[in-house]
Image: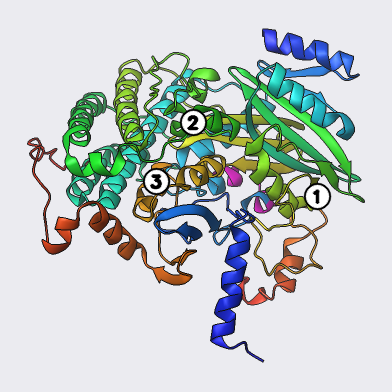
Amino acid sequence: MSETLAQLGKYAEEVGTKVTPLRKNESTIEVSQDRLKAFVAHLVNDLHVRHLMTITGLDLGQNLGIIYHFSMERDTIHVRTTVPKAKPEAVSIIDTVPGAILYEMELHDMFGIEFIGNPWKDQKLLLPEEWPADLPPPLLKTTKADQIRRRLGLEAAKP
Amino acid sequence: MSTPPNQQRREESAGLMEYSTESLVPFGPIHPALKEPEYFKLVLEGERIVNVIPRIGYVHRGLEKAAESRPWVQNMYMFERTCGICSFVHSLCYSQAVEELTMYQVPRRAKYIRTIIAEMERIHSHLLWVGLMGHWAGFDTLFMWVWNDREVVLDLVEAISGNRVHKSMNAFCGVRKDMPENMEDRIIERMKFLTDRARYYREVIDTEETMLKRTENIGRVSADTVEKLCAVGPMARYVGFKRDVRLNDPYAAYDEVPLDVITTTQGDVHALLRLRLDELVASANMVAYAVKNLPDGPIRVKIPPIIPAGEHSSHCEAPRGEIFYFVKSSGGRTPDRVKSRQPTMANLPTALELLKGQTLADIPIVLTAIDPCFGCMDRMSFYDTETNKRWTWSGEELRQYGINYYFPERAKKKSGIKKAIGPPTNQYPREEF
């Protein structure tokens, strides 16, 4: 275990969570939404884990999962957090990691998660601007490809 | 009722003025080909760019959603179609993430073959990029030379895998095809040829006035900005960061093959040209080493079609930078979730930062410099905040504008490339395998 990970483990214990090693060089940490911003700030500013690879969204049934994939030298650190599906609001981390802006917009398009603090959170990134408001976000498990096709009038394109 | 054209134009202009507070940056994660739909809105002050608003997503094909209803193996060949240039590395990264979930190990020979194909892909991608840079700078001769040399490495890829671009070489825990016999000498000979040519092109870009004038001191950005914006690949290395997945988290056979990570601190487009040509030489050396030291043994392990439940991620160094795949399985025949992130997505915030403050004539060069998968500059619309003028240019008109801006004497003469350095004397004979 590298020095950064050891320090991170110590800090994780302080805030009441723990580092779970997945495999060599890869570990995951569960952080609650209200602690996330401070946790990421500590990770980036104090431990110098600066490179955010991307943010992944997950449909976990009742909740939506958000995973921030950080990498530093040999270590990959997954910071996991969840938000309720009924109220999909998450804190934005772009003031600590400016490079996260497009990834947060992508998650907003694909999962409907609002990132509070992201100045572009209401803009479309990947979905067309004419995407109907009554269609649910496309990457939710409950959204079926047929439903999207029917709503957008694309039946003719179906083979 | 339709709006009168004048009023409509005014409304659009008003919208653009709002954009100058940087309010809209849409971008799609999938870049299948160089000539792909892409639309930029540029806000100018005289000649200088003050803001850029790209609009993309035209070619977003919903691969992540599609992956959830397809078998594991089928997905590998689907994700290979993400990009039409760096296709192999996508399937490699996806299969590595899946292999982590199984208990099986990849045979050593397969790891070496993967390395060889991945490095050949890097060579052909970098050559393609150098050619395009020549084209946009107004040095089409370089474009012709370089793309002719690219055929040398594409022929090798075709001889090994059967295809030029979509190699379909990967299988879970191995590769589908073994290296053909008696290829070793031919590969080494061609790698030596490409090394010589890359050195020659370095000489060209360092001495040829066309390239120097168009690339030196263009596209400067501070190392701190690059780090904050999480840029990857050559875009991180050209300001001095040693950010390379092959070095930081070795995959395939990169822990055994001697690796030379090139960085520069010069930090302009000219540095990117040098860096990519040097990387090309490093890749050619790696291919030659891997071919010479190719171990014997099986090339793949058969695995059952059901992947055990779990989550894993994998990242690889594509020619354009780090690509990332995250895979979640619930123990079924199809994945629960696949996430893929392409290097252009990670480099886009940096590219927008690079464009600000440049002149109109530098747009093609700077945008091509990040090696995006969009070379198609068609349908650019311009808006001058000083004169409130608005117009649209095609990519070719923009290219010509850039050339005339730097070399006004060429606008009169039809061809005016000064031959500072002669054409390459050695031509590689094309042959059928």
Q: Mark 3 points at which residue?
A: B366
Secondary structure type for disc 3: helix
- Name the residue type under label 1: Glu
Q: Which of B195/A123 is in front?
A: A123
In the rendered structure, the residue with mark 2 lies on which chain? B
In the rendered structure, the residue with mark 1 lies on which chain? A
Q: In this view, does A128 lie above or below B221?
A: below
Secondary structure type for disc 2: loop
Q: Mark 1 points at which residue?
A: A114
Residue B5 appears anywhere in the view: yes
Q: Are marks 2 and 3 on the same chain?
A: yes
What's the image's color scheme? rainbow
Magenta-span inclusion, residue B32: no
Image quadrant containing the C terminus of chain B: top left
Q: How many labels does the image show?
A: 3
Q: Do tag 3 and tag 1 residues touch (Cβ < 8 Å)?
A: no
Over which residues does the magenta segment extend? Answer: B65-76
- Name the residue type under label 2: Ser
Q: Which of A111/B284 is in front?
A: A111
